[in-house]
Image: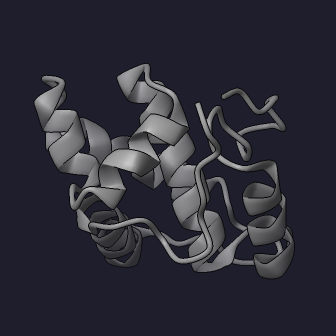
Amino acid sequence: MDVSAMGAGRARGVSAATWSGASRRMGGGGATGRMQAAISGVSQLLNMPAGDLVRQLGSGQSLTSVAAGRGVSAGSVLAAVSRAVSATVPQGRTPLSGNLLTDVSSRIANSTGVPRGFSVTGG
């Protein structure tokens, strides 16, 4: 259940077609690109495969609730998501900042369910 890394985009356990398709559709940014980056960032923070994290999202948990179960604070998750969201800005675009970055990051960190267009490979 391993998909080789492609920058910060593709992560273990998540279908290669999902990552590349999401990245292509959103130009590396947009909502899907931000969620993809957030899952990658939080999976690194929690030291767990992205596929396992996506499966837990599918069982109704949020990134913050999965982290809490592993003893990681919501603040640490929010910081990881904010860094990931900031890194998804396409060249020539103005990065999110301030309240907007905090709001987008918070919504991502606290959303539940598998994001539309994401799939998990077997393993």
Splitting the image into 4 quarters, where does residue 92 fall?
bottom right
Q: How many labels were placed on the picture? A: 0
Is residue 90 visible from the viewing direction of this image? no
Which quarter of the rendering shows the N terminus? top right
- Which of these two is toward me, 89 or 115? 115
111 with respect to 117 (left or right): left
Residue 57 place in picture, x, y as percent: 33, 55
| Quadrant where the image shows the C terminus | top right
Q: Is residue 45 left or right of residue 59?
A: right
Left or right, 102 with respect to 72, comes to right
Q: Please name the residue shown 12% across and 35% down the image.
A: 68
Identify whether 70 is placed above or below 43. above
Question: Is 123 drawn above or below residue 47 in the view shown?
Answer: below
Query: x and y percent of residue 87 in the render?
Result: 65, 53
Q: Residue at point 60% right, 59% down? A: 119
> Residue at 41% of width from left, 41% of height from top?
53
Q: Position of residue 89 (x, y in %)?
A: 70, 66
